[in-house]
Amino acid sequence: MRPDILNPYFAAITDLTGIGPKLARPFERLLGREGGARVLDLLLHLPASTIDRRSRPTLSQVVPDTVVTLEVRVDRHAPTPRGSRAPYRIYAHDETGDIVITYFKGDRNWLERLLPVGETRWISGTVTLYDGIPQMSHPDRVVDEAGLAKLPPIEPVYPLVEGLGQGHLRRAIEAALTRTGELPEWQAGAPATGFHAALFQVHQPRETADASPLGPAWKRLAYDELLAGQLALALVRGRTVKDAGRPSTGDGHVARRIEAALPFTLTRSQVAALEAIRADLASHDRMLRLLQGDVGSGKTVVALLAAATVVEAGRQAALMAPTEILARQHLKTIAPLAQAAGLRVALLTGREKGRARADLLAALEAGEIDLVVGTHALFQEGVAFRDLALAIVDEQHRFGVHQRLALAAKGAAVDVLVMTATPIPRTLVLTYFGDMDSSELREKPAGRKPIDTRALPTERIDEVVASLGRAMAEGRRAYWICPTVEESENSDLAAAEARYEDLRQYFGERVGLVHGRMKGAQKDAAMAAFAAGETQLLVATTVVEVGVDVPEASIIVIEHAERFGLAQLHQLRGRVGRGDVASTCLLLYRRPLGEIARQRIEALRASEDGFFLAEEDLRLRGEGDVLGTRQSGFPGFRLAQLDIHGDLLVAARAEALEMVRTDPDLAGPRGAALRLLLHIFERDVAVKLLGAG
């Protein structure tokens, strides 16, 4: 139950004066709340910038493309001729120059009343130069001297959608601030500005800094959001670890056989990660560990050796992957090693049907399978284990926390190992995986050759196709990556199907195609043909981004490289350089190249270190896109900007951990205030956990 003190914040925006059903619709679009935006959503929609009306230059002092407030005398009106698309023009001047004020589809009577000839008016808006003459189109404000006295000297400017103006936002937010009040303080150390006072300061700034992410009011709100996230993670971990673990200690006989069958020796970081995992498995606390590995750093082998430890203790393990391609890829890596070690391994995806599925499920429940690899099919009803000890979740950010918990619920006190092949910046590890311990695999197995990374404009595509032809004549294999599947009216991206047809004109049956909309069996057949060398060139979308392993592939062409994030480009590049042949990555980009895209491509050419590139990606793009979380339902931030507020994360984490240590049920007065915070930032999972005890 939400405490009554929050009711004004969670009231519908239609309760505010002036917002009826018609206006509610664009507000819902703006606030991302189709079907019912709330007062709170409005208050958390912070300004993008401010207008400082204290600066009032003369026309000769105006800097083009800036927002200014000007005092002008109106000279004459030039209404739009009938049938013309030209704007309605109003000519005005001050003692230093002339300006044209324009309105498209302007009503003559209304404009003559607004800007009467011979009168002085103050106009505010963006000034541009048109044929060398200053012009202001649709001013934000047109007022006389009395109106100027009532204008706030500094006014916030908000992001908008079609159907809403700045005035709509400002009036609605003013009503929302009036309707809501201050809340009990939840931060330690009683900050100078309360939560509601900080909202007031950002929305009704007295200085430009008040409405800036760098200002103290915004920082207070950002810290609140980070604290809510860290507190929720700390509560989830507290509840998970509170359920005592069941120690799993092996004698090493299975692991020794696996290591003997490996074609390489383990890297230092693999050994260190395994030591930490085995210590977790042997302890009386449940394991919650994140294993981050750069491309090709050997996470699957670490996962298999971790599974070996619980199998040696007479128990079972499960490895869950986000896609069938990735699940089958893991099985391909694991199967020969498991066979050498006497491990019983099976695959369970949505494709196993009928008698085969029933037999597999029966064997799993009877304990005749040691390690099962699969997709989300693993945590569905009807899947039972004899004694599941270890759940390994690959590419956690493609799953929700609920799915991870659902798999862990298939056994008693299951230890959880989460893996990702996307190296994650430290601030994001704290943000999204703050409930976990963390291990990193930074080294590549010995013998991996560096990849020659080059960037070319799309005009040179014919040269790329010609050089591919020469490489294929030598027996080499290549990927060609496209961003989308088919041409759509709103997309000018090269489509995989169109590119596949185009390349078949040159190379015939040697070209294969794989994309996310194909059926599982079709994808497998396309991948198998490429792995076997029956096709030499595989046109693909980003379904091959993670885990696909064809050591013979030594060339990758990434079309429209400027459209991809840095971490994703690094992942795609990692599909080559896996064998003993020197490999090449060609980044095809469309001109003109934007500044961020240019920096991204330069960073990729300069480094193969995924952890360095992940930090660069965060700097260039922001947190939500680094993990693809804008698409996968991760709790992205509304107020906190990690490039600006990342340093607040460590303090928020420390405060959250201390709170959970001293008041694990949030039962005291400050605990009650923190429950309000969890509701405000929609970390309701944590509130429900508290209720469940």
Image (cartoon, rainbow, N blue to C red):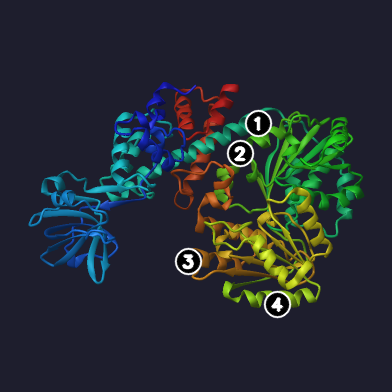
* Marks 4, 2: nearer the viewer: 4
Residue 449 picture location, percent across and down: 74, 69
Question: With 169 as the anchor, is 555 left or right in this view?
Answer: right
* Residue 173 % position (x, y): 32, 38
Q: CA distance from mark 2 to mark 3?
A: 36 Å
Inspect the image, locate mark 2, and give the three-letter code of the amino acid beneath it.
Answer: Asp
Q: Which residue is mark 3?
A: 595
Q: Upstream in the sequence, badge 2 or badge 1?
A: 1
Amino acid at pointer 3: Glu
Q: Quadrant of residue 542?
A: bottom right
Secondary-structure class at tag 3: helix
Instruction: Point out which mark residue 240 bears.
Output: 1
Q: Is residue 283 visible?
A: no
Query: Is 526 left or right of 355, judged from the image as shown?
Result: left
Q: Earlier in the sequence, mark 3 or mark 4?
A: 4
- Badge 1 local density, few (<14 within 10 Å), some, or many (20+)? many
